[in-house]
Each structure stands twice: as structure tokens, then as C-alpha cells.
Amino acid sequence: MKKIKKQRNQNGFTLIELMIVIAIIGLLVGFTLPQYKSYIERTEFSESVRIANKVKLGVGICLQTGDLKDCDTYDEIGMVNPTKGVDNLHSLDITADTAVITATSTILEDPTDADSGYEFILTPTDDAARGVISWEISGSCQNAGLC
């Protein structure tokens, strides 16, 4: 006589299978969350860079008809202050006599200090003999990999 084994139908997942799935999801979240945070910071900081580049263009156009001392205010470069209505830009300043553009973002370098936004600094060098304006990029955004 042959013994007939009854097969049980499986009705769901075992505890071990569920624990493995939860562990895999935890690992994926652990690896992707810091990358996502970095992506969001770079995206928000790019708004500061974009607006600083608009001012840079205005300074460049102004320098075609004058020198750096004549291009150090928004009125002289033919612009209104571009920081109004911008969420991720704390301030954007043009230094007198040198036309150095400093954009400070609202993304904080030190979360305990409300005035510690990352800075994006554009320093112009006017080579009038060659008719070339070169720009040096600096600021705390370089250490953070934002600019």
C-alpha cells in the first residue's frame, strides 16, 4: 500500500521571508537617503548659482562700457535686486569697487547657526587689453561639493 501525503497549501509568507524583505528595504533606504538629501541640497543651491550668474552677465555687459568701479550696484548694471521671491537665496551682494558677487543660500552649512548659508562667490578680473573678463569661483559651497 502506498502512502499518500497530503500537501498543505501555503497561505502567505513565513516570518523569515518577511524579515528578509524588511532587511533588504532597510538597506536600500540606508544607502539612498543620504544621496537623496545631497541631491535636494544641490538642486536648491543651484537656484543661488543661477541668479548669481544673471548678475554676472549684467556685470559683464556693464564692463564693456566702463570699469569694475562703475559696475558694483544693481542700478549700474541695469537690474533690480533679483532676490525678491526666491526661496533658496538669503542674499546676493555686489562688493563696491570690485564687483565681486556673493550669493548666500538659505541652505545652512551649520544647522545651529541661522546665518551660516553656503556662499557662492564670483570674482571678476578685467583684462581690458585683451577685452576679456575672467571669473573665479570660490566660497564655502566648494567644500560641500555644491558648486
Image: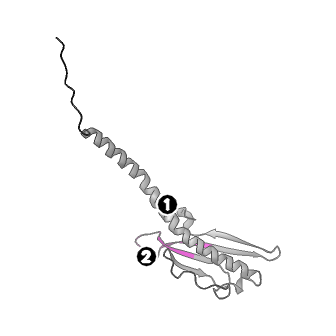
User: Looking at the image, is mark 1 or mark 2 earlier in the sequence?
Assistant: 1
Magenta residues (range): 103-121
Q: Is residue 71 above or below residue 27?
A: below
Q: Quadrant of residue 66?
A: bottom right
Q: Is residue 125 in view?
A: yes
* Left or right, residue 115 beside residue 73: left
The spot of residue 53 in percent (x, y) is 63, 73
Q: Is residue 7 above or below residue 24?
A: above
Distance CA(mark 1)–CA(mark 2): 21 Å
Q: Mark 1 sits on what residue?
A: 39
Where in the figure is residue 56, as x and y percent of width and height? 66, 76
Nearer to us in this view, 60 or 120: 60
Residue 49 in the image: state x and y as whole percent.
58, 71
Residue 106 located within the stretch drawn in magenta? yes
State the mark number for residue 114.
2
Quadrant position of residue 95: bottom right
Spot the residue most to the bottom: 75
Q: Quadrant of residue 113?
A: bottom left
Q: Residue at x 50, y 74 (%)?
A: 88
